Amino acid sequence: MSSLLSLVSAVPSGRPRPVLLDHRDYATAVIRQGAPVPWTDLAALTGHVQQVHALLDPDATWLDGGALYAAHLAAHPGLVEQMGARSRTGYPLRVLLADEDGAERMVRTARTLAEACRRPLVVSVPSPAVWLGRAHALTGHRLESVGEIAADTASMYLAEWLGRLGGLPVALVVLDARTSPGDPVIEVPERLEALSALTNVAAHFDWSVAVRHDAGLEIEGVAVGVVPDGFWAGGADLPDGDALLATIPASATPERVLDQLAVLC
């Protein structure tokens, strides 16, 4: 039984089904009043996430690995220089994920938040192809597109990195394949069946793994419904599923958010 299925069978909040909340934009706008999330200050970050849990009561602690690494790189410009030492496709991501300081920061942060909030973790990171493209862009060796072979190589780098999280209470790993303006073209859409290096690591640790697309979430073994953004304004119904994944928009009204959270109970 995967950790996510265990969460479905014993929902910490007492809701009929677990709610997994991607709250970064909303929490930044409402709780932090526009101030950035303090990714490099573990004590402040822990306090922030505890505030989020006190307000929203999610059934898992959402950890945005992409945002954490962006903050780590901003604080360590020398690492960006190392990533750009070679222009070979995949080299910047390989250096980034092999960085001991970054990996240790990720593990320490994840463990601290899990212990402080007493909830399992949802670890969200860019998908292999997306992270590959963004790592190149940081170094100036920009890619116009990411092909299937390059994406497969990136998935092996990411799989090795994920193994470092093996001692943590991870319920779900979300590989975010949604692209942003400026990202390279992904020539072949990333699908779970093609990411065997990652799914094998997840299976070894009894984690669930999903690929997040604009159209929804691809996952095996448990049905996860993606809540439409309109739900937080009271204008959309809840999807079917054993669990729900929701992103609260930054523009959502706090009073309405609390009302809609009550609908989930």
Image (cartoon, rainbow, N blue to C red):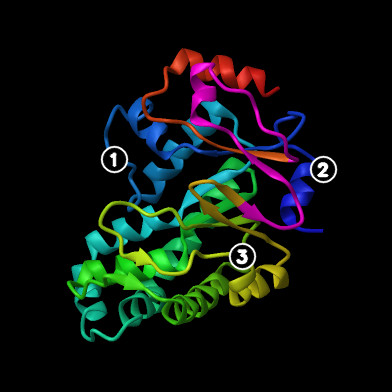
Q: Nearer the viewer, mark 2 or mark 1?
A: 2
Image x and y of residue 237, in percent: 63, 23
Measuring 37% from the left and 53% from the top, which residue is drawn there? Answer: 67
Q: Which element is circle 3 on?
A: helix
Q: Nearer the viewer, mark 3 or mark 2?
A: 3
Image mark for residue 78: none
Measuring 40% from the left and 44% from the top, which residue is drawn there? Answer: 45
Image mark for residue 36: 1
Give the main secondary structure of the magenta stretch: loop
Magenta-span inclusion, residue 4 = no
Crowding around mark 2 (Cα neighbors within 10 Å: few <14, some 14 to 19, many 20+) is few
Image check: 61 left or right of 74?
right
Label 3, label 2: how far apart the Cα atoms are = 24 Å
Image x and y of residue 29, in percent: 33, 29
Q: Quadrant of the N terminus?
A: bottom right
Q: Kindly identify the amino acid type of the residue bearing the numbered disc 3.
A: Leu
The magenta segment is 218-242
Q: Report which residue position mark 3 lands on.
A: 192
Image mark for residue 9: 2
